[in-house]
Amino acid sequence: MAVLTLSAILDDLQVAEAGLHKFERRFWVSSAHFYEMYSQGRLDDGAHSEAFAEWAGHYKLKLKREAALEQLSRLLSFAITLLALPTTLLLLPGAPIFLQKVSDYGQQTGLAG
């Protein structure tokens, strides 16, 4: 199983959203409503079976990457909260900065390996 980076998650979300918007404009229905009808087998997809399969694929990718982003965000939030005790939270842009701060914190507290 490959490890997803934040950049990969965000890139995949951007690609999925672009695909979803293309189909939403073409068929005049939200992706969530489309996917509900599609997964229940309520669509006559004869002439559009390839398009519907691609649309469903974009939607599933979006859901998976949103879940991965939520999980990563919760993990980072938890780590930041632990490192900030008992002081205020320090949230900096960019993972490399955050990781450097985690490393610095470990060295300062003697928790570094």
Image (cartoon, helix red, strand yellow):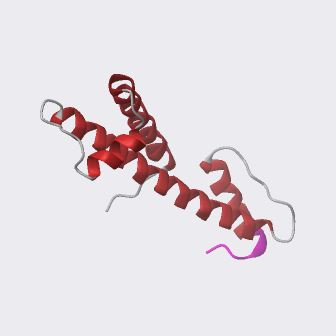
In the rendered image, residue 109 lying in the magenta stretch gets the answer: yes
Q: Position of residue 7 (x, y in %)?
A: 49, 43
105 to the left or right of 21: right
Q: Position of residue 94 (x, y in %)?
A: 63, 45
Q: Position of residue 101 (x, y in %)?
A: 71, 57
Nearer to me, 65 or 6: 65
46 to the left or right of 25: left
Quick check: 86 above or below 22? Answer: below
Quadrant position of residue 46: top left
Quadrant position of residue 14: top left
Please identify the quadrant where the C terminus is shown: bottom right
Quick check: 21 above or below 56? Answer: above
The segment highlighted magenta reads: 107-113
Residue 46 visible from this viewpoint: yes
Q: Residue at x 61, y 62 (%)?
A: 74
Residue 103 visible from this viewpoint: no
Farthest top residue?
26
Q: Position of residue 71 (x, y in %)?
A: 53, 61
Nearer to me, 14 or 34: 34
Farthest left residue?
46
